[in-house]
Image (spheres, rainbow, N blue to C red):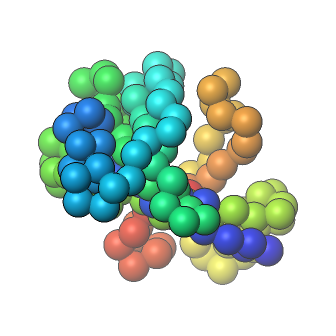
Amino acid sequence: MIMRLSHIGHVVRSIRETELVYQRLFNLNATRRNSIPEAGVNNAFIPCGDNLIELLEPSDSNSILYKYLERKGEGLYHISLVTDDIEAEANALKGKGVQIIEEKPCTNLPFKRIWVTPRSARGVLME
């Protein structure tokens, strides 16, 4: 069962420059910064109420995120939801004909994740 929104991913060319925009406009500040070299991504999380905004900056020109940024520019990248049983959720989605991408667990993340393709979710990548 989907329990809540986890975060919204915002793809950017520069985390530092974008953090300054969030600070200036909304008085919001990043509290966590990470590097995920195996995905070619640097990220920062900005708390916003009970949710998070994840700033995503490509760190590798061969990464999926870099190619996305070059093709579509900065903006909304994904919406992330939390489930109490990811395997059951993945199976239910597959049963509905949803296209999903399952990832191998990332060593820098303490959870498993799947991606629902934008084609299946009306143009939005869902994590």
Tell me which corner region of the image, top left, top right, bottom left or bottom right, holds residue 94: bottom right
* Residue 16 screen position, x and y as percent: 26, 33
Q: Residue at x 60, y 65 (%)?
A: 50
Viewer-side residue, 116 vs 7:
7
Q: Residue at x 31, y 22 (%)?
A: 60
Query: Can you see residue 13?
Result: no
Depicted 108 relative to depicted 45: above or below: above
The quadrant the C terminus occupies is bottom right
Tell me which corner region of the image, top left, top right, bottom left or bottom right, holds residue 80: bottom right
The quadrant the N terminus occupies is bottom right
Depicted 61 relative to depicted 100: above or below: above
Viewer-side residue, 74 vs 119:
74
Depicted 12 relative to depicted 114: above or below: above
Left/right placement of residue 11 relative to residue 110 reads left
Left/right placement of residue 84 relative to residue 103 reads right
Viewer-side residue, 89 vs 11:
11
* Residue 69 screen position, x and y as percent: 22, 44
Query: Can you see residue 63?
Result: yes
Q: Residue at x 39, y 69 (%)?
A: 124
Depicted 77 relative to depicted 93: above or below: above
* Residue 75 screen position, x and y as percent: 25, 57
User: Exactly how many numbered labels are in the figure?
Assistant: 0
Q: Residue at x 45, y 49 (%)?
A: 46
Left/right placement of residue 1 relative to residue 52 reads right
* Residue 120 screen position, x and y as percent: 47, 73
